[in-house]
Image (spheres, rainbow, N blue to C red):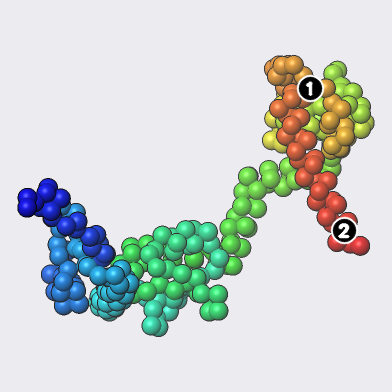
Amino acid sequence: MEESDDDLAEPPVQDISGAVVTFPYDRMTIERFRQVFPRARWSDERKSWFVPGKTAARRVDRWLAHEAELVAIYADNKGRDAFAFDPISSPYLEVANDLRIRTPYSRSVLKELREIPWASWDDGLHVWRVPFRSYEELRRRWSKIEQAAQGAEPEARRRRREAERDSEAGKSDRLRTAERRRRRYPVLAEDLPSVGRAVATEQYGVVIFTGVSGELVEPSKFSVVYPHMSAARDYIWASWRSATLAELIETWPARRAARSSELSRGWWQPTLAELRVARRNARSGERRKRTRDLKRR
């Protein structure tokens, strides 16, 4: 009886179940791995280890988690040694089973701490906790953290506010705030805006002028607030209010941007882009007003 080709063929090879493992090369780690997984085989093609078995993936995950704990413990011990050799002495740093940073609120401090590996905020203690394994990175960033924390202290903030208040910039800011509260605006005496019509201004956006007082403006005193003013021309005060959303919707936009002559007088017909910004702000203002009214009820 002759054998057929089917009789001579090798039986099909079943797929071998298992898990593929990769980790950084370290002689001691490999020894521990081979002790736990003696049947594991290295693949030069895949550059990884293969562990056979139906439960291999679960066993490998447990081993990797245990190795991560060993690495963390070793890194923490190394960080403690580094701290003992070159400690950080600061009122903002407390030493416990980890490193704890407590500072006044500062965006710069938060930015630096968020860049430190494994650093986390503790809601209960109200501190940032940094494990010793991250000490080298904390040490590298500490000068910026401490400097920002010192600048965020209440006394330092008070000194800065006083210095800014006495500076020319501080005086200009206070003058701008006072002028906005007065709701007045210098307009050319020979080219007055139409009362009740929405117009664009450089300082206050799209507004509606409500009247003209006839009082002359001193350009030398208010030019820092209203840069369109010229000492060679006469300006008088005009009162204004913010335009409502309905008024802004009804306003017809200009077909072109304002010319230099219109900019120099301080007001002009708003373009569609300027009206869109004003309408968006007006909608937000109306929503805030409705919310406040509901809370009062």
Looking at the image, residue 114 lies above or below residue 225: below
Please name the residue shown 92% across and 32% down the image: 210
Q: Quadrant of residue 192?
A: top right
Q: Nearer the viewer, mark 2 or mark 1?
A: 2
Work out whether residue 261 or residue 35 is closer to the camera in this orientation and state it.
Answer: 35
Q: How many marks?
A: 2
For the view shown, which residue lies furthest in the left direction? 1
Which numbered disc covers residue 253? 1
Work out whether residue 206 or residue 76 is closer to the camera in this orientation and state it.
Answer: 76
* Percent of width and height locating residue 5: 12, 47
Asked whether disc 2 touches disc 1, contact meaning CB atoms under 8 Å apart, the reply is no
Name the amino acid type tagged 1.
Pro
Helix, strand or loop for disc 1: loop
Q: Earlier in the sequence, mark 2 or mark 1?
A: 1
* Percent of width and height locating residue 195: 92, 27
- Circle 2 packing at 10 Å, graded few (<14), some (14-19), many (20+), is few
Which numbered disc covers residue 275? none
For the view shown, which residue lies furthest in the bottom direction? 96
Q: Determine whether, in the image, residue 119 is placed left or right of residue 266.
A: left
Name the amino acid type tagged 2.
Leu
Work out whether residue 136 or residue 236 is closer to the camera in this orientation and state it.
Answer: 136
The quadrant the C terminus occupies is: bottom right
Please name the residue shown 84% across and 51% down the image: 289
* Percent of width and height locating residue 154: 59, 67
Q: Determine whether, in the image, residue 113 is placed left or right of residue 34.
A: right
Looking at the image, residue 206 lies above or below residue 286: above
Q: Quadrant of residue 190?
A: top right
Which residue in the protein does label 2 denote? 294
Helix, strand or loop for disc 2: helix
* Percent of width and height locating residue 287: 81, 48
Q: Determine whether, in the image, residue 264 is placed left or right of residue 46.
A: right
